[in-house]
Image: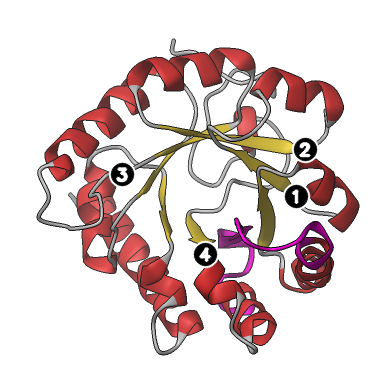
Amino acid sequence: MGVGSKWGNGLVADGAGLGGGPGPALPVIHAVTDDLALERPGFLNQARAVMHALGERGAVHLRAQALTAARLFEIGAALGRAQERTGCWLVVNDRVDVALTTGARAVQLTSRSMSVRDARRIAPDLRLGASVHALGEGLDAAASGADWLVVAHVFGKDAQHVEAERGNWLLTELAAAVSLPCLAIGGIRPEHVPMLRAARAYGVAAISGIWHADDAAEAAMEYLSRYDAAESGQSSS
């Protein structure tokens, strides 16, 4: 058995709670913000629309590098209320304190964050994701108690980049080595979803593919539609 999470035996089937036990399933489509999206005057309405569209099968990651802590909390509090109405998860990147005070369901830890072990000590009831760039990082995060992994730079910034091949390899290797859900991120477009599911991705995360689209909610639904189509194809094969 692969390295798992403290939430259970680490085996997470599609539609099962984290750790294979009771509780909500980890969403399959993750809409990760950037500063450009957050700076738009209509961002909150846009985010609420995405959360409504995806429901409990989606998550909005509040990821910001340029915002003040006060503004981050303000946006997080608004999205925390939307989480309760829509069932779509709010995940706060890096900031465990903001996640705890806004009612977010989870934190996504990165290379800039505190360790998974420290975050678990501070916030034992929060779900914890870990962003990883190498096999060793993924194994360490799983052993430290992460609930899922986000495997970075699957396609890099350019879908034709040489890192595409390396990213698929890393995703497949991690999915085989750990008994945690592995999400793919990095230049992912909706048409990539079937390929990534075949490479054992539990789900996908997107930044520009959702937030830089003309209609973010429609774009998010396109990812989910491709996910469901891939599932139907696997079930019938």
Which mark identifies residue 116? none
Q: Closer to the observer: label 1 or label 4?
A: 4
Task: Name the amino acid, label 3.
Answer: His
Counting residues from the N terminus, which is met first, the one under dot 1 or under dot 3?
1
Q: Are marks 1 and 3 in contact (CB under 8 Å)?
A: no
Question: In the rendering, at what x and y percent does residue 87 appear?
Answer: 71, 65
Element marked by disc 3: loop
- Identity of the residue drawn at 64% across and 20% down: 145
Element marked by disc 2: loop
Q: How far apart are marks 1 and 2 (CA)?
A: 6 Å
Counting residues from the N terminus, which is met first, the one under dot 3 or under dot 2?
2
The residue stretch that appears in magenta: 52-72
Q: How far apart are marks 4 and 2 (CA)?
A: 23 Å
Which mark identifies residue 153? 3
- Identity of the residue drawn at 75% across and 49% down: 105
Kindly identify which residue carries mark 2: 126
Kindly identify which residue carries mark 1: 105
Task: Name the amino acid, label 2.
Answer: Leu
Q: Do the residues labelled 1 and 2 touch (CB within 8 Å)?
A: yes
